[in-house]
Image (spheres, rainbow, N blue to C red):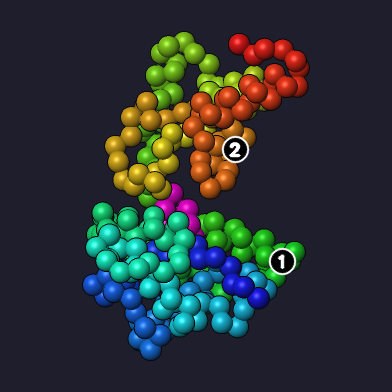
Amino acid sequence: MRDPPWKRDEIILACALVVDNSWKELRPGDARVAELSSFLRGLPLHLQNVRSEAFRGVNSVSRKTTDLATRCPGYSGAKTRGSKLDTEVVLAFWREPERMMAAAARIRALAGEFKEQPLVDGSDEAEEGSAMEGRLLLRAHRVRERNPKPKKAKLAQVRRKGLLIACEVCSFDFGRFYGPHGEGYIECHHVVPLHYIGESETRSADLALLCSNCHRMIHRGKQWLTPEQLRELVEGQGRRGSGLTVV
């Protein structure tokens, strides 16, 4: 059985070890590797029935530190096989080490709220585990990185122009479809995702108002789409489906 891919939170914790070790890999016999191995095995981020006996063992953790160390911008040797997410995390630590080390500390602190559970697909416990995974990631990343003020400014700007609060891709209007219950509701999307640019000042021009479906479609896949690209796909589907030209 192949163990599940490393999640961002796990990679952040491993990279914190590498940074603390002067951007050098850590070997399996290192006590810090053993501690992180035990910590990761206790996190409810992966279902029990997709874990092998070697899940996040000392060899796996050591190898991950090697992958991360060889992606350090100052490393001059050959890189090992790692993931795109490995590179993203390394660059985040390289650019903002204090912020990312603080993020690693928060992940460890938040993990104390959860207990390891024998999760199995299709059970009630599996559904609880999925919820706990999302809760951990949201509190460690999304809440920290999101500020409600830019969205409020964006909505105010749209209203000043006399425009509807509707999806900028497909024009879906929650108020029109759901009545008073949906009035004024819309999701706000960073045109360039925050996980890519890191901490930055957000302007109204950096945001797009999207319905839930279009928001998910923009983020689907390894490379996100811009609102313009998704609008072209939607319009293309309309032309193929109706035989009419969308203007």
What residue do we see at 46% from left, 28% from top?
208
Q: Nearer the viewer, mark 1 or mark 2?
A: 2
Task: Please tell me how crowded label 2 is: few (under 14), some (14-19), or many (20+) other residues with Cα within 10 Å.
Answer: few
What residue do we see at 63% from left, 26% from top?
234
Query: Horizontal placement of 100 versus 128: left or right?
Result: left
| Residue bearing the label numbered 2 | 217
Q: Seen from this angle, which residue lies furthest bottom? A: 29
Image: 83 above or below 216 = below
| Residue 8 placement (x, y as % from top left) | 46, 60
Q: Looking at the picture, which amino acid does disc 1 mark?
A: Asp
What residue do we see at 42% from left, 61% from top?
86
| Residue 183 placement (x, y as % from top left) | 58, 23
Quadrant location of the N terminus?
bottom right
Disc 1 secondary structure class: loop
| Residue bearing the label numbered 1 | 121
Q: Looking at the picture, which amino acid does disc 2 mark?
A: Met
Please tell me whether residue 92 belongs to the stretch shown in magenta.
Answer: no
Residue 211 at least partly seen: no
Residue 60 at least partly seen: yes
Quadrant location of the C terminus?
top right
> Camera-side residue: 208 or 182?
208
Quadrant of the rendered image containing residue 133: bottom right
Q: What type of secondary structure mainly makes up the magenta span?
A: helix
Magenta region, residue range: 136-142
Task: Please tell me how crowded label 1 is: few (under 14), some (14-19), or many (20+) other residues with Cα within 10 Å.
Answer: few
Disc 2 secondary structure class: helix
> Camera-side residue: 42 or 214?
214
| Residue 105 placement (x, y as % from top left) | 34, 66
What residue do we see at 64% from left, 62% from top?
128
| Residue 37 placement (x, y as % from top left) | 46, 79
